[in-house]
Amino acid sequence: MTNYESTATTMFKEHTATPPEGRPSQIRHVTPMASPQLPPLSSPPQDTQPLSQFIYPPRDIEADLNDDDGTWGYLFPLSSVGHRLVMKRRAFCPAPVPPLEIGRSTVKSKKRGKKELERAEVSYEEEKQTAGFPASGYLVGRHPECDMILDIPTVSNRHCLLFNETKNGDAIAVLEDLSSNGTFVNEAIVGRNKRRELEDGDEITILDEARFVFRYPKSRDSSAFSSRYRILQQLGKGHFATVYLCVERSTGFKYAVKKFERRLGESQRSQTEGLQQEIAVLMSVSHPNVLCLKETFDEHDGVYLILELAAEGELFNWIVTKQKLTEEETRKVFIQLFQGTKYLHERNIVHRDIKPENILLTDKKLSVKLADFGLAKIIGEESFTTTLCGTPSCKWSIQSV
């Protein structure tokens, strides 16, 4: 279901053009050896190379901007390419629509053809555009679902991602490079699937085609996790993280919070890489069959991921309780899994660890969500994955599900 007949990206399968050799965007700026050691979750601001000739927009450049409405950052264009982008906290978690298979108007059991499923996906994408419930992060690229569309052949479909985290009580902006041709911060390349914390006034360059300056709001939000959320109870525990039930103090809504404890040595580096990838993937997607990430907090005692709550728990426990699913229940589960996986593959994202433990149920109607993207990978438009990964001990038979 991820071939060229895809309904969501058929017209955007053309390859990203390679810029001419010798262009400034292809120069790989090497950081001096004396740069300070990298912190756990991002490259330091000292690692960016300051520009020698650049006039930053003054603080009063936009008198109409309101910093009190959840805004965490701005992008101002420095050329005729692009537009001003106001980045706010987006609270569409979970998305205000049911999963495509669960949201059917009919209650009768009926096999759905490929064309009908494709129409449902197209309808969902159209509703998402009009109703306005995008991903938490902000995408810049060539694809129409991007928040800033740059219709330039050398720009990737999804070139870079901007999102915010809360680190040690301070709200910070993070840029993740998703491109094949490069995203630059202060003329230093970030690198595919790598991230950089942004400082106020940083210049972001997309090839040689578009330049922007990043600005924080005048009053930055400095509220920490404990001031925004309250932990109620533990829901589960894994090798790297513990999942808790929490409640948002301002709204009373319940979420799952995944806490990654700080570790020492090689295990910390491995955990950090997986965590950064998981955050980048979840911040870039919005689909009713993919668990959504609301926001993150990087605190002194660990990293907190605020996730959509799947109240019925793992599909694994459902199967253990019921012993097996009926044919109708199995069809319902697999259609949702195929729709969620197809959505990810169309965006060059591979999960690499789909199993009953990583499929969550939000209700007793078997509404499923793909979760745990710690092994997920964002691949290039013509790339393949070669790493052997997943869960070797997972041997579920088709009779079980």
Image (cartoon, grey):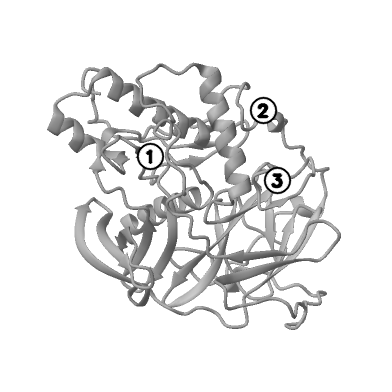
Q: Is residue 151 left or right of residue 389?
A: right
Mark 1 or mark 2, which is nearer the start of the sequence? 2
Outermost residue toward the right?
Answer: 80
Instruction: Give the quarter of the figure containing the C terminus.
Output: top left
Q: Is residue 69 left or right of residue 148?
A: left
C-beta proximity under 8 Å, tags 2 and 1: no
Measure the alpha-carbon separation of dots 2 and 3.
Answer: 22 Å
Q: Which mark is residue 181?
A: 3
Q: Is residue 89 left or right of residue 252?
A: right
Mark 3 or mark 2, which is nearer the start of the sequence? 2
Read off the residue under disc 2: 10
Amino acid type shown at disc 3: Asn
81 or 310: nearer the viewer: 310
Q: Which mark is residue 370?
A: 1
Whole-percent x and y of residue 204? Answer: 70, 63
Amino acid type shown at disc 2: Thr
Whole-percent x and y of residue 162? Answer: 59, 59
Res. 312 visible in picture = yes
